[in-house]
Image (cartoon, rainbow, N blue to C red):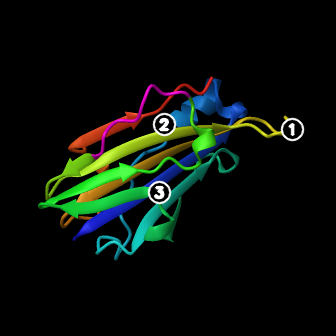
Amino acid sequence: MEVTVQWVRTSWTKRSRGGEAAARRNAVPVGFPLPDGTAAPVRTVHTVRMHEKDDFRPYDGRAERKHVGVQLRETEGRLRVFPRVDPLFGLPPRARRPPAVRLAPGQWVRWQLNYRFSSAAGVRDWSYWLDTFNVAYGPVTADVFLGTPAFHVDEQGPVR
């Protein structure tokens, strides 16, 4: 199974919920070029992290596949993709989750989930995450996630 996974996480606080800061946050990319060696059988995942405190500058990294919240299963020549919701308490209200996506060879999906958190004691500001999982099935080029996906699942809920 030739699968490439890129996990992009953007995180911010209430300070980036409006105005110029929100415009910067909303302008960050949700797909990045792959570093050398990432397009390989799934053992590691290309990660990109962006945070408000760094003015949403992207930082590349790698994570072990087992630490990334997306389920992948190959069945009957297709790849079943379904992100796990983790942590469940951070989800904004949603009616229900969409079904898994089944990719044919040569296709890729962009799946987006958002989260919101508050401190238990109310001491810290609300914080937010946007997780974007870009998953490709089959051989890819380094710029695969810069294009248009075959499937886009926007599972973002209201963050108030």
Task: Give, as a three-letter code, the residue at label 1.
Answer: Ala
Report the mark closest to the observer, 1 or 2: 1
x%, y% of residue 68? 47, 61
Look at the picture and state if 47 lies above or below 154: below
> The disc labelled 3 sits on which kind of residue?
Gly
Q: Secondary structure at mark 1?
A: loop
Which of the two labelled residues, at mark 3 and mark 2, occupies the earlier sequence position? 2
Helix, strand or loop status at disc 2: loop
Q: Is residue 101 left or right of residue 88?
A: left
Q: Is residue 146 left or right of residue 112?
A: left
Q: Residue at x 51, y 66 (%)?
A: 67
Report the disc number at residue 27. Answer: 2
State the residue in front, 61 or 71. Answer: 71
Residue 76 in view, yes or no:
yes
Which of pointers 3 and 2 indicates the residue nearer the eye?
3
Whole-angstrom CA distance, mark 3 to mark 1, is 28 Å
Q: Which residue is mark 1?
A: 121
Point out the image quarter for the C terminus: top right
* Image disc number at residue 69: 3
Of residues 1 and 60, the one drawn nearer to the viewer in this rendering:
1
Q: Which residues are magenta?
A: 93-100
Q: Are marks 3 and 1 in contact (CB under 8 Å)?
A: no
Quarter of the rendering containing residue 22: top right
Q: Residue at x 62, y 40 (%)?
A: 90
